[in-house]
Image (cartoon, helix red, strand yellow):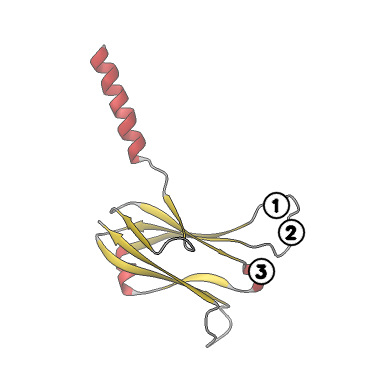
Amino acid sequence: MKSLLLSFMAFLLLGCLGCATPRRFDASDVTSISLHVDETFTIDIRGNRTTGFIWRQVPNDDSQALLELVGESYETVKSKRNLCGAPGTFHFQYRAKTQGKCLLQFENIRPWEKGASPSGTRAISVVVE
């Protein structure tokens, strides 16, 4: 009975380790990330799309070979007053596909302004082991 209980507890522990919540990184606080193959993670970048500016990833061959973009979303700051024009956070969720290194680059732009420089940039070095 004791060995059955220990086996069940080990099964639960290993099951919980395999279902870990994806890691989150604030792009204003981090410049490098280390993770493992098949691990998922989210990059959060504060912004305000009501100004017309959006954060987007600058595509490059290295990051596309190493990482799969699983999803993108935008979330406004929660407040009691539901302010019009309130800032929010852009979320970029990725899955590490294979081992290697790349540079994730983001730019804050107004997509309709052709030839305009970004109002901001972020770069995060990613190492997948």
Query: x and y percent of residue 91 in the render?
Result: 51, 59
Disc 1 vs disc 3: which is toward the camera?
Answer: 1
Label 1 sits on what residue type? Ser
Q: Which mark is residue 50?
A: 3
Q: CA distance from mark 2 to mark 1?
A: 7 Å
Quadrant of the drawing holding the C terminus: bottom left
Residue in view at x 68 percent, y 62 percent: 86
Q: CA distance from mark 1 to mark 3?
A: 16 Å
Label 3 sits on what residue type? Thr
- Earlier-in-chain disc, 1 versus 3: 3
Comparing 9 with 69, the one in front is 9
Query: x and y percent of residue 50 in the render?
Result: 66, 69
Query: x and y percent of residue 108 in the render?
Result: 53, 74
SS state under label 2: loop
Residue behind mark 1: 79
Residue in view at x 59 percent, y 73 percent: 53
Q: In the shown orientation, is residue 3 left or right of residue 27?
A: left
Label 2 sits on what residue type? Leu
Query: x and y percent of residue 109 in the render?
Result: 55, 77
**Outermost residue to the right:** 81
Q: Which mark is residue 83?
A: 2
SS state under label 3: helix
Q: Are marks 2 and 1 in contact (CB under 8 Å)?
A: yes
Q: CA distance from mark 2 to mark 3?
A: 11 Å
